[in-house]
Amino acid sequence: MQKRYLMTPGPTSVPAEVLLAQAQPMIHHRAPGYSKVFMSVLDGSKYVFQTENDVLIFSSSGTGGMESAVVNLFSPGDKVVVVNTGNFGTRFVQICEIYGLTVTELAYEWGEKANPSDVAEALEKDKEIKGVFATHSETSTGIVNDIKTIGDIVKDTGAAFIVDTVSGLGALEFKTDDWHVDVAISGSQKALMAPPGIAFVAVSKKAWDMVEKSTLPKFYFSYKKSMAALQKATPQNPFTPPVSLILGLDEALKMIKEEGLENIVKRHNVLGKAARAGVKALGLEFFGACDETSNAVTAIKAPEGIDGKNIVKIMREQFGITIAGGQGRIAGKIFRLGHLGYYDKFDILVTLSGLEMTLRELGYSFDIGAGVSAAEKVFMENSF
Amino acid sequence: MQKRYLMTPGPTSVPAEVLLAQAQPMIHHRAPGYSKVFMSVLDGSKYVFQTENDVLIFSSSGTGGMESAVVNLFSPGDKVVVVNTGNFGTRFVQICEIYGLTVTELAYEWGEKANPSDVAEALEKDKEIKGVFATHSETSTGIVNDIKTIGDIVKDTGAAFIVDTVSGLGALEFKTDDWHVDVAISGSQKALMAPPGIAFVAVSKKAWDMVEKSTLPKFYFSYKKSMAALQKATPQNPFTPPVSLILGLDEALKMIKEEGLENIVKRHNVLGKAARAGVKALGLEFFGACDETSNAVTAIKAPEGIDGKNIVKIMREQFGITIAGGQGRIAGKIFRLGHLGYYDKFDILVTLSGLEMTLRELGYSFDIGAGVSAAEKVFMENSF
């Protein structure tokens, strides 16, 4: 018997209440009973997004949500700026290029944060820029970009501000309206504590004006089709929605409302702090600009002479703890602990304990218990 | 207390075993445990598709699968033929046109079946046709097109044959390879007895050759990206898959394998026959070319002077039975009984009984019990 612990930055652990809500009898997506749940999910999403903008829902992964922003707002040849701080910034670059946009890439070393003044400079240099893409929490490196400051820069220009907050929303502070985000993109499988399969977008008035002018082809991800279905007498989706996931998500959003966003952000602050304290006490080095904002994912360098993939493998096989390795160009060089969503103190403790036993087995030298006791101290000093 | 019965042509009733399989603890989509389930789902899908071709899976509705065939095989300006026998044929026309294909539409009255010789004629007239699109079971009208004969016509031309069998696969006979279907498209929420949120495509060698030449932009629905992820050491999806739906679908496919495709087709034959016998005994008229192949959906004309929407409403509100109304241009004029997937004798009985009580309330005159007894007779004479 081996208990399993899921400590990756998505999909994340799903509460039993949510898992079981999916097991409700199937309902028809054009009948009033579905509309009621759907509206409740949209209400809950607006609360988490902190927005009065329209929220649209797609049956897809977060990447589908990212692609939707590109094909709905732009036309071939449009000039855009992409802030690229890692794997998911690179994905925005790829999608924009495939759809024929002219991309100015602000590329940073993986692990670095974006410098908002670079965005200001790019927008200043070319007044024809129609969109700025950025990643809130860069899941691949653990860093969190300063979306608020970038939003303040973009808001008075003609450009739309598009933000991937797939692994940020519901864990870190994120204010769609106050931060002037025109398309905020998220997914069900991260801090929202639900299974993967739903992408959300929150679309501002400024973004809708661009939707009117966009000539890129779209059908499945069409914002206009989504909006038209939403405005029917029984609000619905243009194409069959993932009903069981919607039922689960509704339950998850109710749990989020009950805890309260402010408390949730506070909890993630403490979990992140404890994870960092534990890692530091083991003498490990963080990857890149890991700081007090890195509360969704902790990215750690594999110690000299140890392959990060081995850490992930031993954690999973011997201790039942699934963590994530490095993606893309840093595969094998780092490993990542996800702690966004349905996580509490002892999930951090378990992970640090498994990490200690794994590192010892790999011959890395440190004081046994140093990681877990550092985390315990953080929990005793910081309530949530 | 009112028991609920879902008798629509999708989403369909989901067995409790499948509903509960979704409630398993979340697993990570890049870990070996997921690969195992994913491969099992692909195996099961190949069995249902009756194919040796590659099966790819998308987190989307069936419409996403339809769009995927267009954007992966074709280039702007390519000439295609679309067989249009209803709402879902029309959808193929719309998607092809939005992506800049030059469409020859073979449009039939709603309720009619396509005439395969029209396809032969269109292909004969223009040798540059690169694709033929058709619908197997046209959910909006209940008719079933003769895919086998159309496949025989298309196979020796340069055109790819793309078939939407979203509401056919797993209920009606469908042989991807024997019928020379190059892209067969289906979804999880119909005869496969799983919740909505997964689209499948079975892609032939001929289709892959066209994928190589296609210039239409695609990212999320890219067949090449899907195939590359599938060919990794731990087979996976390029973007986060809907893990809980995959777990449910795996269970559903196991149930399908256990019953056996031949038995399933036989069961649907008898269910369809019983539904038609019941409807006929009530003196109602079928919509269009409803015949012995219409075993997924029975489409019925609303009797003179009665709004089809009222039949749907009373069935749902007073009797707890959800059936479907008419779509598009025939809204209000017809109503549809879905019986594809997890359905047995008494589901048909319940539906006919609810229909009798509803029609009587709406003032339609017939012998009470005539519908259910006609169905009972069919069940006594036809085993499955």
Image (spheres, coloured by chain):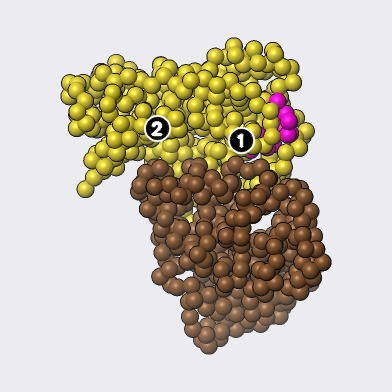
Chain colours: A brown, B yellow
Q: Residue at x 77, y 59 (%)?
A: A128
Category of crowding for the residue at label 1, using alpha-carbon neighbours closer than 10 angstroms: few (below 14), some (14–19), many (at least 20): many
Residue A224 appears anywhere in the view = yes
- Report x, y in % for residue A327: 72, 59
**Residue tagged by mark 1?**
B95
What residue sits 50% from the left and 42% below the top?
Answer: A239
Question: Does the segment drawn in magenta span residue B71?
Answer: yes
Badge 2 element: loop
Three-letter amino acid code at disc 1? Ile
Callouts 1 and 2 in the same chain: yes
Q: Position of residue A110 (x, y in %)?
A: 76, 67
Tell me how far mark 1 sits from mark 2, CA to CA: 22 Å
Query: Amino acid under label 2?
Result: Ala
Figure label count: 2
User: Dot 2, crowdedness within 10 Å: few (<14), some or many (≥20)?
Assistant: few
The numbered mark, 1 or 2, whose residue comes first in the sequence reads 1
Q: Is residue A237 left or right of residue B82?
A: left
- Marks 1 & 2, CB-CB < 8 Å contact: no
Answer whether residue A88 is magenta in the image: no
Question: Residue B100 placed where, x, y %?
Answer: 69, 34
Compared with A348, A62 (above or below) is above
| B36, above or below B203, in the image | below
Q: Is residue B73 above or below residue A271?
A: above
Give the magenta range. Answer: B68-79
Q: Nearer the viewer, mark 1 or mark 2?
A: 2
Q: Which mark is residue B331?
A: 2
Helix, strand or loop at label 1? It is helix
- For residue B318, which quarter of the picture? top left
